[in-house]
Structures are given as C-alpha cells and as structure tokens.
C-alpha cells in the first residue's frame, strides 16, 4: 500500500497535534481525577473543526474523509482517550443522520454539533447485551404519527450534555429500528457508572421512559437498524484504533523521558540499559503496526469498501497491542508507574478500556472469523 498524506492531511495532522498539546494535555489529568466531561475543551475542538469532521459542508462542517479523522484521532488520543471517544461518537451520529436521515433531521441536529453547542451520544449496548440484537429489551412502538420508546441503555458516552442521541430499539417485527432524538427530553434520565478509565466520557446508564419521537426521526427503513449499526461500527472501531496508536506513542514518549532522567547503577541513565532499550524497541514496533493498520482500514473505507471485518481487526489488534505497550511503559517506570504522579498510570487504565469498549475482543474475533469461514 502506497499511502502518502496530502499536504492538506499534513496540515490537519499538525493542527490536531498543536491543539492536543496546547488545549488537552494541560487538563487531561484533572479530567481523569474529577471524571467530569471536559466541556470547555470539547467546545474548542468544535471551533477548530476537530469534532464534527464528517458533517457536510452544507451544514457548516468540513466534510472530511475517514483517513482524515483517523489522523486527527491519533493526535487527540495521545493526550486524552476520552476526547478520542468523543470524536468517534460524534461522527458515528453524523454518518447515521447523513446516510439514513431526512433533511429535517440533518438540518435540526447536525449544525449544533458543528458549532459545539450540542454533543452527540451513539449507543447500542443494553444491560442484557453488548452485541447480540436478539437479546434487546428496549422497545419502539408506533403510536399514530409518533413512536414511543421504552428501555435502558448502558455504557453510553457523553449522555449529560445537551445534544443528539442515535440509538436502536426492537420494533413490532422483532427487528431493530434506528432512530434519533434529543437528549434531556421528557422521559430521558441517566444513572452513574464509575469507570477505571476513559474518565470524563460520561459513560452511564440511560433510561428511556415513554419517550415520544416523531415518525420523521426514524433513520432509514424500519427494522433495518442492525445492518445500519454494522455499517457504522467498522468506522468507529478504526477511529478508536487510531486513538490507541496515539496512546501508545504517549507511552513511548513518557517512558523515554522518565528513563533519561532516572539514574541507575554507576549514575547511568536508565536508557543506557539494554533491557530498557529492548522494551522501547518493542513498544515502537507495536505502535507503528497499530498506526498503519488504522490508516489502512480507514483508507479502504474512503475507497468505498465495507470495513466490518477490517474495523474489527484494527480494534482487536490495537487494543491488545496498546495494553502491552503501556504495560512495558509501566515496567520502565518501575514502582513510579503505579502512581498518579506519572501519566503512564492513566494511560494503563485507559488502554485496558480499549479492550472492552466497542465490542469486547472476543466478539471482534468472532466477527473476523465469520468472514474467514463464510462460503
């Protein structure tokens, strides 16, 4: 694969890196400590066109492609996995509305996301299931020109800020229907989940109690929600894989910085030890592989390919690999790596979240294998 960034993509990469280091890095540890959604930073992301990147120009967005988003998310993931998740959720919602929504839905919901006035939630998981639509408990029932929704969603990110929620419920045919509504509407309430990592992502339970939505807010055909979900989730996994690559690069940089300052034996820096150099070499190799796998998958999507399998492969490899990379970084830090005084501790907790978000790795293995053995 001959993948070369265009001059525009190089500018996008540089702008994202500058923003991450200037605006995200100084506040990321505090966001982790408080577990509060970083609203001010998220608004600045929108103002710098680093959030609603898939939004069409017609609605004020930059209308970037998938490789562009991956390039940005790698840089954001370096400083905050939480904000990498926000990019994924935002653009998954926008794609859902652009692909299957009508003009009313697009005009109502997309411009506020572009301006950073609203923030998006995109969710599938329920208490009874993370991946199996047959186990869905939430219901959507037609009532005249409206639909009424009841149910509960779990581990849905960014549920508190005003904005749009794209989700799925079982209809009267027993299939899933995809729909969109405004968060914080009558019947919408949330619970609190205290997670080990990706803190500040506001990932909580959502209770849907007789929420009434217009018929026009059904996305695409009734009963076709699961195929639509599969269409979107491959892109989402690739974006999170890119954020993981950024996380791994941060682990490398933090480890080199620590090892240069840490003196051992005859007052030598830790970087002089062969054991440290071997760990760093392993980390570098694994991060490069993760980076290029996310680039490759997103490039296929931009060429029109369906990347259900490739997205699952990128997510599976990235999550396993980055946990290993950050673990090596903790090892280089020694006991200091277990303390919150060093960024590597936060990276370790965040990296483990990657293995269980957007489909646990066991599900992604099953998806990949199903393509391999299909006749």
Image: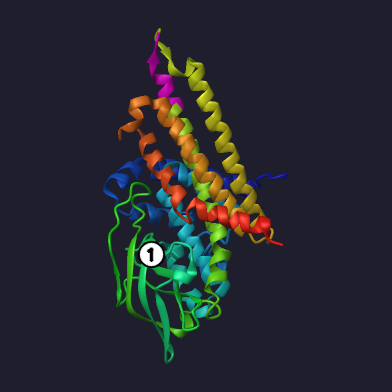
At horizontal 65% and vertical 45% (from top left) the residue drawn is 5
Quick one: 38 or 128, which is closer to the camera? Answer: 128
* SS for callout 1: loop
Residue 230 part of the magenta segment:
no
Q: Residues within 10 Å of mark 1 (few under 14, many from 20)?
A: some
At horizontal 45% and vertical 35% (from top left) the residue drawn is 326
Image location (x, y in percent) of residue 38: 34, 52
Image location (x, y in percent) of residue 187: 30, 76
Quick one: 94 or 280, which is closer to the camera? Answer: 280
**Circle 1 is placed at which residue position?**
117
At horizontal 44% and vertical 31% (from top left) the residue drawn is 329
Q: Is residue 256 above or below residue 12?
A: above
Image location (x, y in percent) of residue 284: 55, 32
Residue 150, can we see it?
Answer: yes
Residue 257 part of the magenta segment:
yes
Image quadrant occupied by the N terminus: top right
What's drawn in magenta, residue-wise?
A: 256-265
Q: Is residue 345 above or below residue 125?
A: above
């Amino acid at each position: 694969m001959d993948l070369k960034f265009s001059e525009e993509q190089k500018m996008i990469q540089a702008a994202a890196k500058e923003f991450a280091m200037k605006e995200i890095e100084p506040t990321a540890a505090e966001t982790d400590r408080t577990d509060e959604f970083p609203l001010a930073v998220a608004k600045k992301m929108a103002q710098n066109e680093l959030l609603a990147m898939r939004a069409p120009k017609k609605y004020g967005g930059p209308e970037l492609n998938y490789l562009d988003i991956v390039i940005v998310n790698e840089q954001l993931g370096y400083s905050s996995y939480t904000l990498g998740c926000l990019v994924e959720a935002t653009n998954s919602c926008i794609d859902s509305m652009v692909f299957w929504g009508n003009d009313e839905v697009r005009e109502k919901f997309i411009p506020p996301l572009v301006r950073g006035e609203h923030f998006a939630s995109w969710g599938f998981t329920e208490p009874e299931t993370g991946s199996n639509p047959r186990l869905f408990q939430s219901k959507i029932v037609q009532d005249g020109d409206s639909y009424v929704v009841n149910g509960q969603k779990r581990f849905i990110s960014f549920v508190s800020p005003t904005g749009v929620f794209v989700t799925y419920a079982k209809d009267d045919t027993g299939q899933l229907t995809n729909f969109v509504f405004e968060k914080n509407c009558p019947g919408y309430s949330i619970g609190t989940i205290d997670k080990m990592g990706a803190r500040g992502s506001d990932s909580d339970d959502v209770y849907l109690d007789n929420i009434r939505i217009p018929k026009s807010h059904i996305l695409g055909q009734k009963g076709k929600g699961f195929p639509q979900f599969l269409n979107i989730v491959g892109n989402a996994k690739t974006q999170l894989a890119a954020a993981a690559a950024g996380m791994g690069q941060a682990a490398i940089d933090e480890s080199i910085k620590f090892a240069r300052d840490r003196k051992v034996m005859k007052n030598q820096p830790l970087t002089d030890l062969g054991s440290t150099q071997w760990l760093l070499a392993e980390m570098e190799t694994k991060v490069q592989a993760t980076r290029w796998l996310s680039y490759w998958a997103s490039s296929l999507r931009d060429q029109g390919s369906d990347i259900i399998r490739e997205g699952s492969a990128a997510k599976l490899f990235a999550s396993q690999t980055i946990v290993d990379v950050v673990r090596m970084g903790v090892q280089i830090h020694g006991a200091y790596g277990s303390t919150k005084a060093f960024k590597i501790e936060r990276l370790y907790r965040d990296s483990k979240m990657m293995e269980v978000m957007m489909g646990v790795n066991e599900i992604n293995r099953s998806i990949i294998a199903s393509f391999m053995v299909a006749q």
